[in-house]
Amino acid sequence: MRVLQWRIAAAVGVVAVVVACARTPVVGVARGVGDIDAGTVAGLPVDNNGPSGPKQGVEDANLTVENADRGEMDRLATNALSDIYDYWTTHMQADFGERFEPVRRLASYDSGGKAITLCGTSTKGLVNAFYCGKDDSVAWDRGELLPMLDKQFGPMSVVAVLAHEMGHAVQYRLGEKSNISQSTPTIIKEQQADCYAGGFFRYVADKKAKHFDINTGQGLNHVLATMFFIRDPAGASATKQGAHGLAFDRVFAFQAGFVEGPKRCARMDADEINGRIVEKERDESEIEGSDDGDVDLTDNEVRELLKASLEQAFGDIKNHPEITYDGAGCASGGSTPPVSFCADNNTIAVDTEAVQKIATPPKRGQEPGVDGAGIGDFAAFAEIASRYSLSIQKTAGAPLTGEKTGLRTACLTGAWARFTDTDGGRKLRLAIGDLDEAVAELLQDNSLIAADAQGRQIPSGFARVEAFRIGYFEGDKGCADRFS
């Protein structure tokens, strides 16, 4: 979030009265993106206890890989590509009536070791994984990139990256059937590739992959979190050559493929993507008055601006809570540190030190929210906003516990985020990259953004992100329609 000076604009309340009525989730029924069941992931029950990663006791794949060292990273990559080949052998024919042909060339290299030439480029210092249409090849850096992904997010993040690159190979083969031509903007190709990767992961979650498992709880959530790590830099325009999209956009594309399959991915075109990419033409140099950095929650002015933002966003409610910063405890119990909604005195209690840690951006190579690493100021503000929304829900007569409350809380937090994305007087305004921080925080195992008043989190990372997205794009009406 940035403290900005803009012209004065009238505040518009974003929250309608949302009174809950219970609905029993149906387990095992496939649902489209935006049709949320907190207890399932596209019809699959959420499971945190199932296996997630390489299967044990399975014979390794026998694929020819140039320059391989036969180490653990090459073994992981080769097995992943073998399963991806199996997936596309089935789905290329079933979904598009085409025979799948494996790529002509697989190559491994060490970006810090002896350089080789791939796709006309030296691999010296090339920390990357890529598909090259010139020679129909997929290559990966076993020296730095794959070990870094494995360490930070686990082995399935490596599988996700390679599934994305093979998505490009599929585009190359399908051409017009995937809405792809020589002139197609990069962002469309990248969104489709993320989507195709999501389709493959549904295949893994359905227990069809030979070498890998993924559980639909933390396992899949960590794959989604990988999108935060490999997203475009904040401020990068989606209209520029080479754009991949921000995490907020990439997670949507992955989810679309997981839920609806490859045909959905092939339908992604310029009209659709331009209609939903949030930061397609925003650049830091274009934002007048930016202070060029994350704000400090210990600053009294920032606290006042946050309070004003929440009061204006939730303007239809008269009984706004107070926000205190001397600890997250509630006198009558029921605290949910680092931020609590204390219903007895209508107070949002904040542990300043703990929340400021969340607000501190991670250093290079750190996984957001892990081993003491922070995420960014929007993640911290969203934690506070989520507890603030519970006060609003209480005033509206809605229950404060249960999965419906968690979804409604995420949705209202998204509606508040959209409110901060409008011009106004001196205020906290959504800055470039902040929505990615929301994605990263939503996928943390202890996030409050999609949790009820007792801190019980929605188990499905898919549902958390989608509820937030609905609030951001549809505002109070979307929250009322979906979660009342």
Image: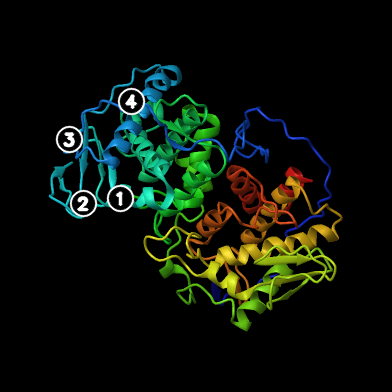
Q: Quadrant of the N terminus?
A: bottom right
Q: Mark 3 or 4 closer to N-term?
A: 4
Q: Secondary structure at mark 3?
A: loop
Q: Which residue is mark 2?
A: 111
Q: CA distance from mark 1 to mark 2?
A: 8 Å
Give the structural element (helix, strand or loop) at label 1: helix
Question: Which of 160 and 69 lies nearest the eye of the viewer?
Answer: 69
The answer to whether mark 3 and mark 2 are in CB contact below 8 A is: no
Report the residue marked by disc 3.
Answer: 66
Within 10 Å of disc 1 (Cα), the crowding (few <14, some 14-19, many 20+) is: some
Q: CA distance from mark 1 to mark 3?
A: 18 Å
Query: Residue sitting at 67 percent across and 64 percent down?
Result: 385
Residue lying at 62% horizontally and 28% vertically, measured from the top left: 30
Disc 3 and disc 4: Cα gap in Å?
Answer: 20 Å
Q: Tell me the mark number nearer the camera, choosing from 4 and 2.
A: 4
Instruction: Between residue 283 and residue 62, name the one nearer to us.
Output: 62
Pointer 4 or 1: first along the chain: 4
Q: Which residue is mark 4?
A: 59
In the image: residue 110, left or right of residue 292 = left
Q: What percent of the width, then of the height, locates residue 151? A: 38, 51
Earlier-in-chain disc, 1 versus 3: 3
Determine whether label 4 and label 1 are within 8 Å by CB: no
Q: Where does the image place residue 156, in percent across and percent down from the top left?
A: 42, 41
Q: Are marks 1 and 2 in contact (CB under 8 Å)?
A: yes
Residue bearing mark 1: 145
Three-letter residue code for mark 4: Glu
